[in-house]
Image (cartoon, rainbow, N blue to C red):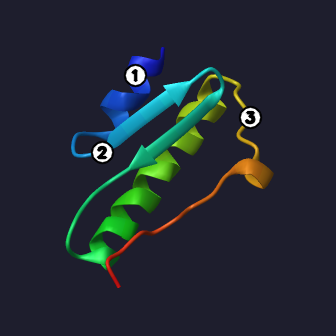
Amino acid sequence: MINDLFEEVGSGFGFSLYADDGALWKRGKNVRYVVKQLQRALGVVERWSALWGLRISTAKTKFVVFGRR
């Protein structure tokens, strides 16, 4: 089941899962491109969660961009 999600999100992303917590990340030099790709991936996660009847807590969900500047 969870492997389906990784396949749908696509390659080039990092994932970390522990119990009912997860993280998704992507590295790149173009921040706008990376943010756009992460937003697309989050849409995939949202649709996948709805398909399997899982609820994602928006109160505990964070979108963070790290950079050198």
- Name the residue that disc number 1 marks: 4
Q: Is residue 43 above or below residue 20?
A: below
- Name the residue that disc number 2 marks: 13
User: From mark 2 to mark 1, how far is it between C-alphas?
Assistant: 14 Å
Binning the other alpha carbons within 10 Å of mark 2 as few (below 14), some (14 to 19) or many (20 upward) gives some
- Name the residue that disc number 3 marks: 55
Q: Is residue 47 left or right of residue 14?
A: right
Question: Within the image, what quadrant is residue 47 found in?
Answer: top right
- The image shows residue 31 at horizontal and vertical percentages of 31, 76
As drawn, which residue projects farthest toward the bottom? 69
Residue occupying the point 44% across, 45% down = 24
Helix, strand or loop under label 2: loop
Determine contact: label 2, label 3, CB under 8 Å.
no
Q: Amino acid at mark 1?
A: Asp
Residue occupying the point 50% across, 42% down = 23
User: From mark 2 to mark 3, how far is it between C-alphas?
Assistant: 22 Å
Q: Is residue 33 left or right of residue 64?
A: left
Helix, strand or loop under label 3: loop
Earlier-in-chain disc, 2 versus 1: 1
